[in-house]
Amino acid sequence: MKIERKQSVVLVPCPYQGHLTPMLQLGSILYSQGFFVIVAHTQYNAPNYSNYPEFVFHSMDDRFQEIDISFPSLENLYSMNENCKVHLRDYLFTMMEEEGNQIIACIIYDNVMFFVDDVATQLKVPSIVLRTFSAAFTQSMITIFQQPEKYFPFEDSQLLDPLPDLHPLRYKDAPFFVIKNTVPEAELEFRRAICDIGSSVATIWNTMQDLESSMLLRLQEHYKVPFFPIGPFHKMAPSASSTSILEEDNSCIEWLDRQTPNSVLYVSLGSIVRIDDKELIETAWGLANSEQPFLWVIRPGSVSGFQCAEALPDGYEEMVGERGRIVKWAPQKQVLAHPALGGFYTHCGWNSTLESICEQVPMICRPIIADQLVNARYLTQIYKVGIELEVIERTVIEKTIRKLMLSEEGKDVKKRVVDMKQNIVAGMQIGGTSHKNLKDLVDFISALPS
Ligand code: UDX
């Protein structure tokens, strides 16, 4: 069926993998619903245009050529917001002058790119915020920064105590960069900025109503604008084009093909976090001693002070032989969907979390920063589809892997993730919540005044 295309939506992603991916997936969803899609992106980590020939791409001069912005520090994120403002405004202004104001239905921006709200207001174009995080994380941020003095500073002895009003979180799960048991004011300010939706007219969420309904309701009372939870995006999007910034090593799929069903543990800590060499070595021995097959992503730069896997014990790869496979970057969604997969040792990034649940893969949770801490707590305590890795020490890692892959408790975790996946599938079908919310979103954008 030929689609009569309507207006354009302008998407402004944040250029880190865990943010770029859901924005491109959202673009693919909206394109399938009849909108033209324009992606205004930074030069840094520009998407691969050939994977999305149906989109119009526009590169913003981010002035980052001289700076290392590979880690999303506060300074880098503020610079990003500052540097792109004038460029985006001028680009859209020229487009509207040439094509007429009605050309743009709305601008949809990642909550981290909060400068867009100002640009949209200046141009009198409606804006919509995309939340790439879980609702639980956003709710926890809002609760904490409304009364930070109630939470910080805290004592070391409180780390395992519950965070007031934030069940099931403990002090150690506080989703902020905590320094000396308190949170710097600059960090609080930044979190406020990303939670503030300014004059935006709606929010889109890469989550599901069925998964986070009470949390979404509370947030909607706070924001008082229409909410569209239409996730999980990677399953709702008709295009399965790669969104990877790094090159995927597809040879690991052939290796997976040679493994027994449900036997392999996939290990990956996402695209941002770094660990130290001590953790790498403990993980290496935990994996080796567990005697389970494993596929391990060691991303270049992910071990502080090292390029890549050279921090591993000497002769490690020869020692584990065919039982273990180490790659720099994997086609993760394909890996998780492979029948050989039995478990996922994850940092609990929100994309990885959704991807794992959708393929009914149970998890070992090793969160490191920000939303990962909240996600991990929900996975282990509320949904019970993951097991917490309590200590980063080789014997504990070995024991936790065996628990997930071999024990009765592991089987129960697997059963729950199978049920959870079924609920998600139901939500995406006709009559399901994400399906219905998407239809509402399309009607909402189509009715926006231009
Ligand atoms: C970060 C946060 O941790 C995340 O929670 C937030 O929502 C976005 O920013 P990241 O740490 O990269 O993202 O984790 P995650 O959200 O899991 O995203 C990683 C993405 O990279 C996933 O889509 C995953 O499929 C992909 N990936 C990861 C690969 O394709 N190959 C790999 O080898 C590893």
Image: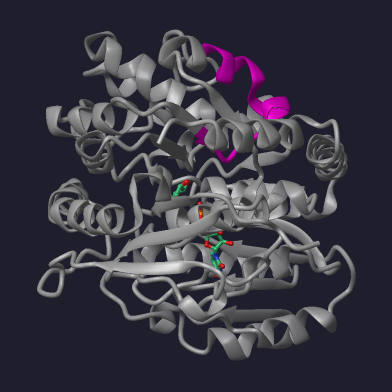
Vertical order, 357 against 55 (above or below): above
Estimate the x, y position of residue 167 in percent, counting from the top left.
53, 15
Q: Is residue 327 above or below residue 415?
A: below
Which one is in front, 52 or 396?
A: 52
User: What residue do we see at 81% from left, 42% from top?
Assistant: 421
Instruction: Judge whether residue 216 is colored magenta.
Output: yes
Q: How many marks?
A: 0
Q: Report the colour scheme.
A: one colour
Residue at image position (62%, 47%) is 353
Is residue 26 a member of the stretch shown in magenta?
no
* Image position of 370 with respect to 308: above or below: above
Q: Residue 289 or 153: which is nearer the viewer? A: 153
Where in the figure is residue 177, as x and y percent of width and height? 27, 37
Q: Position of residue 7 (x, y in %)?
A: 51, 49
Q: For this rendering, which residue is in front, 326 or 426?
A: 426
- Residue 66 % position (x, y): 10, 74
Looking at the picture, does residue 446 appear above or below residue 392?
Answer: above
- Our reading of the magenta stretch's main secondary structure is helix
In the displayed structure image, the side of residue 273 where residue 88 appears, left or right: left
Answer left or right for 35 relative to 56. Answer: right
Tell me if residue 362 can be seen: no
Q: Is residue 312 visible?
A: yes
Magenta stretch bounds: 204-218
Q: Quadrant of the C terminus?
A: top left
- What residue is rendered at 70% in x and 35% in y? 439
For the N terminus, the image quarter is bottom right
